[in-house]
Image (tube, rainbow, N blue to C red):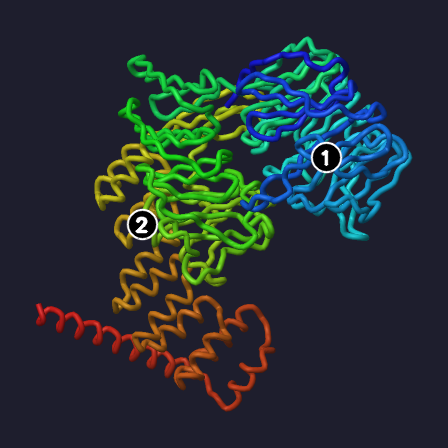
């Protein structure tokens, strides 16, 4: 992550610069109270006069129409809105021609912002009003009206809400009539600037109390800075939501999304009134009150994997250091680096035009291929391939540079996809649906097509973060997700019927607790081998380690070396290790090992259950009881029914007190109705209750419960099952 900013200072305006905006990755427009609009070319370091505004227009805010919506370029993207102190906003072309001027407010129009798809414009005025306009400048509605000026306004991620300042308050106002308004006190002085990031859904505010703060979309405070020397006059999120910038008098901060500061720079530019990030998030422009336009380039980012550390030393070069032997390699690129990722022995670097793929054992000859879009916003890596997200879509590439697939779905918005909402494994791509965050869409990584019948994974609550597991066969691929209650759930991605999704609570026995203080809200950055790297709330990195025994245990389990696994657990004498072995052994139906492991952690009921499974008279009953042990009730019943073991299927439901299903099976197959009624009567007598189920009352009429006859019938059923299994084994032996 970045920890340093470099500056290019140039003074071409003769008065206060009020606003700036990026047209391309290397071109910036600036507006000043000297009535000039200038164009800055960062490649040639040239400054050009675009237009001289009329003397009565003092610009206050500038915002370019979004160039792409859902990966499609807009035809009319070369226009911007310019708000001014005369109560008007102006729609202007890239050439500086004023296409339309609209009387919008009484007093100055302090802010103007396009929504994310460019179909609507919001303006905020000195008169305290918030107005929504069409793309052509026609008034749609007056959303709010208050007695104090509205200094700043921003759209919510889905363009269905806005947030605006109201004195010391922040107000979130939905566009739907009569919808609930959220309002809270944000600062001890007037709130001067706000920004709402579409990717992470976090809100940034700065005020006269000299503080900047980070909020979630419910108005809950996540971070508050200590007071600075001067009021906060500007702030802006980077497009990917990973960092943000804050400007004040002679000061510029670069901060992590959690609030702590990467870098603080003294600018000697007086107050910074406006900040804007380039679309690729690598550059920052600022409008200053002394006539300067400042440009910052994010450098000194770091990536680590095993014994390698990589640093972005300049915009177009990286340094690779092998900490084992202090060997250093320098990687040079033709264009500036936008994004990079380092994992699974491969470094993937996206520049503004190309993608470079390096192997950790050879830094001299990268694989290079061209990119369709120059604004890569996310790189995810799996063992066999990696995923790129840019302004046009999602793409899965092999490490040889071959395009494997491009998952698509209706309503895809690549501009709001982040690392918490998408995950990649060797065979699966999982994407959280931003239009309905209770839904996870699952795709085959090799074809880009929806998995199975195309049905998504649906949860009862909104999901905050998702992750696919990276090991094992595709048939057993699992996904973990955290919902808004901060509960962790697991599900199989290729078995997603409503009955088959199982939310699994991790057994307490499997947890290995490290007694170490990491501060509040630590964040896991990487987990490679036995080393875990965490970032604390103040930004400091803390390496930690876990015991190496679990990795050895999983290696033994994968190669079916169960005796070695038991010896390892006995040597380590760790309850968490025994619990892991128990789960692995049951998953592989290795009952003897599972029995030893469960006994070691004191799970005696499970030990008895395993012994009961081993005593089953047939392989069908054996398999069914294994399925029951894992909670797969319907599968266990189906195994019995397919084998013609009707009584055993009925008994499974009796054991689980599924009385209605047990009676349904008995009536359907015309057998053991009296058995079900007998067990039901015994159950009710134990708890001192009377029968109130009309169906049981109906079938109980005229049926005499005789336990001796029932026990005899059961013994006959079990004898038949033993005989059937013995005959099957004999036939198999003869065939061999």
Query: For mark 1, does the 10 Å Cα neighbourhood hold few (<14), some (14 to 19), or many (20 or more) residues?
Result: some
Left or right: residue 628 compared with residue 413 = left
Comparing 581 with 298, the one in front is 298
Residue at 54% from the left image edge and 73% from the top image edge: 685
Q: Position of residue 87 (x, y in %)?
A: 86, 33
Q: Secondary structure at mark 2?
A: loop
Left or right: residue 121 compared with residue 465 = right
Please tell me in which quadrant of the rendered image residue 213 appears.
top right
Q: Position of residue 127 (x, y in %)?
A: 89, 34
Q: How many numbered discs? A: 2
Comparing 15 with 193, the one in front is 15
Residue at 57% from the left image edge and 16% from the top image edge: 45
Q: Which residue is mark 1?
A: 92
Left or right: residue 263 compared with residue 162 = left
Q: Position of residue 626 (x, y in %)?
A: 33, 60
Residue at 30% from the left image edge and 49% from the top image edge: 585
Q: Which residue is mark 2?
A: 473
N-term mark: 1 or 2? 1
Residue 607 in view, yes or no? no
Mark 1 against mark 2, which lies toward the viewer?
A: 1
């Amino acid at each position: 992550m970045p920890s340093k900013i470099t500056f290019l200072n140039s003074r071409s305006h003769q008065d206060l610069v009020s606003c700036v905006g990026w047209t391309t990755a290397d071109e910036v427009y600036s507006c000043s109270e000297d009535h000039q609009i200038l164009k800055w070319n960062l490649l040639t370091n040239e400054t050009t006069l675009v237009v001289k505004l009329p003397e009565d227009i003092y610009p206050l805010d500038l915002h370019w129409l979004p160039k792409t919506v859902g990966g499609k370029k807009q035809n009319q993207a070369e226009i911007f809105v310019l708000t001014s102190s005369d109560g008007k906003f102006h729609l202007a072309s890239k050439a500086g021609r004023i296409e339309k001027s609209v009387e919008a407010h009484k007093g100055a129009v302090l802010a103007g912002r396009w929504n994310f798809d460019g179909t609507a414009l919001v303006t905020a005025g000195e008169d305290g009003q918030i107005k929504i306009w069409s793309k052509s400048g026609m008034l749609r509605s007056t959303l709010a009206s208050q007695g104090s000026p509205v200094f700043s306004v921003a759209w919510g991620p889905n363009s269905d809400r806005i947030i605006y300042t109201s004195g010391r308050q922040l107000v979130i106002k939905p566009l739907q009539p009569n919808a609930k308004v959220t309002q809270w006190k944000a600062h001890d002085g007037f709130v001067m600037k706000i920004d709402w990031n579409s990717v992470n859904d976090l809100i940034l505010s700065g005020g006269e109390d000299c503080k900047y703060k980070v909020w979630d979309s419910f108005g809950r405070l996540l971070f508050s800075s200590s007071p600075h020397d001067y009021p906060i006059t500007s702030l802006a999120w980077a497009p990917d939501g990973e960092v943000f910038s804050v400007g004040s008098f002679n000061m510029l901060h670069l901060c992590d999304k959690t609030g702590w500061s990467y870098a603080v720079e003294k600018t000697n530019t007086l107050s910074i009134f406006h900040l804007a990030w380039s679309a690729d998030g690598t550059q920052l422009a600022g409008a200053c009150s002394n006539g300067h336009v400042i440009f910052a380039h994010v450098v000194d980012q770091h990536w680590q994997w095993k014994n390698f550390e990589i640093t972005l030393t300049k915009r177009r070069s990286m340094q690779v250091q092998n900490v084992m032997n202090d060997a250093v390699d320098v990687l040079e690129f033709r264009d500036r680096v936008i994004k990079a990722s380092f994992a699974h022995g491969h470094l993937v670097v996206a520049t503004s035009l190309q993608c470079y793929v390096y192997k950790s054992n050879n830094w001299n000859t990268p694989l290079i291929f061209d990119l369709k879009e120059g604004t890569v916003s996310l790189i995810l890596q799996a063992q066999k391939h990696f995923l790129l997200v840019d302004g046009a879509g999602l793409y899965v590439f092999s490490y040889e540079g071959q395009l494997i697939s491009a998952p698509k779905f209706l309503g895809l918005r690549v501009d709001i996809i982040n690392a918490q909402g998408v995950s990649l494994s060797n065979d699966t791509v999982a994407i959280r649906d931003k239009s309905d965050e209770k839904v996870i869409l699952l795709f085959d990584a090799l074809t880009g097509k929806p998995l199975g019948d195309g049905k998504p994974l649906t949860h009862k609550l909104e999901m905050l973060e998702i992750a696919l597991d990276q090991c094992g066969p595709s048939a057993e691929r699992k996904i973990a997700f955290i919902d808004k209650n901060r509960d962790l759930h697991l599900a199989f991605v290729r078995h997603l019927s409503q009955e088959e999704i199982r939310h699994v609570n991790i057994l307490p026995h499997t947890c290995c607790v490290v007694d170490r203080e990491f501060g509040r809200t630590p964040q896991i950055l990487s987990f490679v081998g036995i080393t875990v790297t965490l970032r604390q709330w103040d930004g400091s990195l803390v390496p930690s380690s876990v015991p190496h025994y679990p990795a050895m245990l999983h290696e033994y389990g994968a190669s079916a070396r169960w005796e070695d696994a038991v010896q390892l657990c006995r040597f380590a004498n760790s309850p968490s290790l025994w619990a892991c072995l128990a789960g692995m052994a049951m998953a592989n139906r290795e009952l003897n090992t599972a029995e030893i492991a469960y006994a070691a952690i004191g799970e005696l009921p499970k030990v008895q259950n395993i012994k009961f499974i081993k005593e089953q008279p047939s392989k069908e009953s054996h398999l069914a009881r294994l399925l029951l042990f894992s909670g797969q009730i319907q599968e266990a019943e189906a195994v019995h029914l397919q084998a013609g073991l009707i009584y055993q299927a009925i008994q499974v439901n009796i054991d689980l007190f599924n009385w209605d299903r047990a009676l349904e099976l008995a009536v359907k197959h015309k057998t053991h109705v009296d058995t079900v009624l007998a067990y039901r009567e015994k159950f009710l007598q134990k708890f001192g209750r009377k029968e109130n189920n009309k169906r049981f009352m109906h079938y109980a009429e005229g049926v005499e419960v005789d336990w001796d006859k029932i026990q005899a019938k059961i013994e006959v059923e079990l004898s038949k099952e033993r005989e059937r299994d013995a005959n099957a084994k004999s036939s198999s032996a003869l065939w061999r």
